[in-house]
Amino acid sequence: MPERAIGVFDSGVGGLTVLRALRQHVPDESLVYLGDTARVPYGTKSSPTVMRYAHEAARFLLAQRVKLLVVACNTASAVAVDELIERYQVPVIGVILPGAKRALEMTRNGRIGVVGTEGTIRSGAYDRALQEFRPDIVVHTAACPLFVPIAEEGWSCHEVARLAAHEYLAPLLDKGIDTLVLGCTHYPLLKNTLQEVVGPDVQLVDSAQETAKAVKLRLEQDQLLQSPSATQPPCYFVTDIPDRFIRVGGAFLGEQLKDVKTVVLD
């Protein structure tokens, strides 16, 4: 069991920020990544549809004999993680709970901002996660739909990114937040620009990094850490033509993606 890979899925390339963080925190682990590029984005889909997509992705990765599932998509985490945990016989970790816990550790004034896709913000998942642990926490949210295409175009440090960030974040800053959760796996790519916009008094929570830390802890607890001698190169699967995934994903990871395979989910 320890020698099996970790399975990671997202609606597209955004989850590669989680994969990158996993390579930092558990470098000896083998990784299998599935990008559901035929149906991206999940953030505009209904909850039942996202639930169905999540089950199809989970079944595909379990067929690859993975030992742990990472739902590297905030929308799918908001909708499907609890049901995936109940349904499947491997640990399942989403990106919302790790980010929420870290935000609670970091905030000084109890005012936390969350930015994400329309689907994630509409779900209220971060509000629930944060207030479950601390009912006194005040949560302010903002959907930032332009951040994903900006990140995928490689414009993370472009003036376009700064202008969009100012527009989206100004209302949150007016509310006096001191912590901002990056509630979409694309958003860590804009971290430098976002920090510049919010200023030094607001701390950013990178949900990709926090998720990777949670995965490491769970592997340690379950004695599932892989030995270095068993490590395999990452495997990449997509559900549509891989050209864009290879180009954008390579930019996300800073390396060329090889042997990306196209699959059909059911």
Image: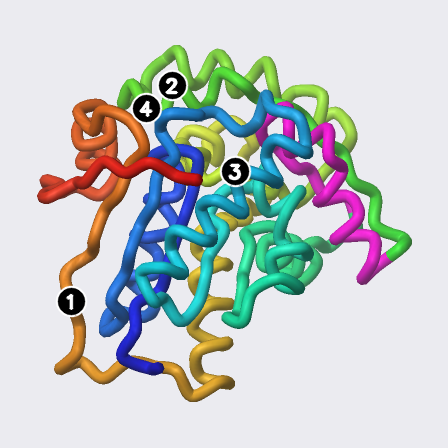
User: Which residue carries the number 4 mark?
Assistant: 152
| Residue 241 vs residue 173, the one in the foreground | 241
* Distance in Å between CA atoms under marks 4 and 1: 27 Å
- Residue at figure coordinates x 59%, y 35% from the top left: 50
Residue 7, percent from left and from top: 37, 58
**In the rendered view, how is the structure colored?**
rainbow
Q: Is residue 7 above or below residue 79?
A: below
Mark 4–mark 2 distance (CA, rounded to whole Å): 6 Å
Q: Quadrant of the C terminus?
A: top left
Gap between marks 3 and 1 measured at Cα: 27 Å
Q: CA distance from mark 3 to mark 4?
A: 22 Å
The residue at which mark 1 appears reads as 232
Judge whether 198 appears above or below 233 on screen: above
Examine the rendering and report whether any part of residue 66 can be seen: yes
- Residue 150's tag is 2
Crowding near pointer 3: few (<14 within 10 Å), some, many (20+)? many
